[in-house]
Image: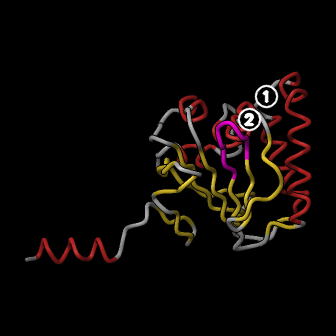
Amino acid sequence: MVFRVLLLLLIAFPAHAAEVAGIRIEEKAQVENSSLSLNGAGLRKRAFFQVYAMGLYLPEKKTAAAEAIGAAGPKRVAIHMLRDVGADQFSEALMDGMRDNHSEADMKALEPRARQLAAIMAEMKEARKGMRITLDWLPGKGTQLTVEGKPSGAPIAGEDFYRALLRIWLGENAVQADLKKALLGGS
């Protein structure tokens, strides 16, 4: 009897995978026709400010950064803003994270697409507290930025660009060591 009650509770109140700074991070994400699993979730801090909670979704769980970055198929980075950040400041932080994990020659090759992402983000004007932003890798299409579930701008070509974005959080010089660990399933 107790087992049935527990089973009914689990069905009626499905568990979520994580909670980060009061933000519920779901266990699954649907990217086009693929169901992705939460690989890990964590909190991006800057000084003593909580900037955003984020989750990394992959086709299957990975605990090594290189495997997560190189995983085949669709992927998602879900960002839940915890404070208002100007679009220029947000874009510049992403570009700094890319520069920290790539050679000058690699950045030169990525630069036109980085400018494309910055232009898309500039249209937002501001990443506001409570806003949900996703960066999806769509095989055959590119990197799609969405804001509140709606596509923003055209997809940005090249899986190398999406992998460059992932290196911001998972690279050798990741923006925050404890966030990297959390995204790779560590606590």
Q: Residue 41: name its quadrant.
A: bottom right
Query: Which residue is at 74% across, 73% downward?
Result: 129
Residue 100: x %, y % from top left: 79, 34
Q: Residue 82: name its quadrant.
A: bottom right
What residue is disc 1 on?
Answer: 102
**For numbered disc 2, what is the local secondary structure?**
helix
Camera-side residue of 8 and 67:
8
Residue 104: x %, y % from top left: 88, 25
Whichever of labels 2 and 1 marks the residue nearer the N terminus, that label is 1
Q: Pick the quarter of the image with the N terminus.
A: bottom left
Residue lying at the far left of the rendered structure: 1
Query: Which residue is at 70% across, 33% downward?
Result: 159
Give the mark toward the camera: 2 or 1: 2
Camera-side residue of 183 and 77:
77
Q: Amino acid at mark 2?
A: Ala
- The answer, for residue 167, to whether it is visible in the render is no
What residue is disc 2 on?
Answer: 164
Query: Which residue is at 47% across, 46% downward?
Result: 185
Mark 2 Cα-neighbour bin, 10 Å: few <14, some 14–19, many ≥20: many
**For numbered disc 1, what is the local secondary structure?**
loop
Magenta stretch bounds: 135-143
Q: Is residue 32 left or right of residue 11?
A: right
Q: Amino acid at mark 1?
A: His
- The answer, for residue 34, to whether it is visible in the render is yes
Residue 21 falls inside the magenta stretch: no
Distance of label 2 from label 1 (alpha carbons): 8 Å
Query: Which residue is at 68% across, 39% downward?
Result: 174
Q: Are marks 2 and 1 in contact (CB under 8 Å)?
A: yes
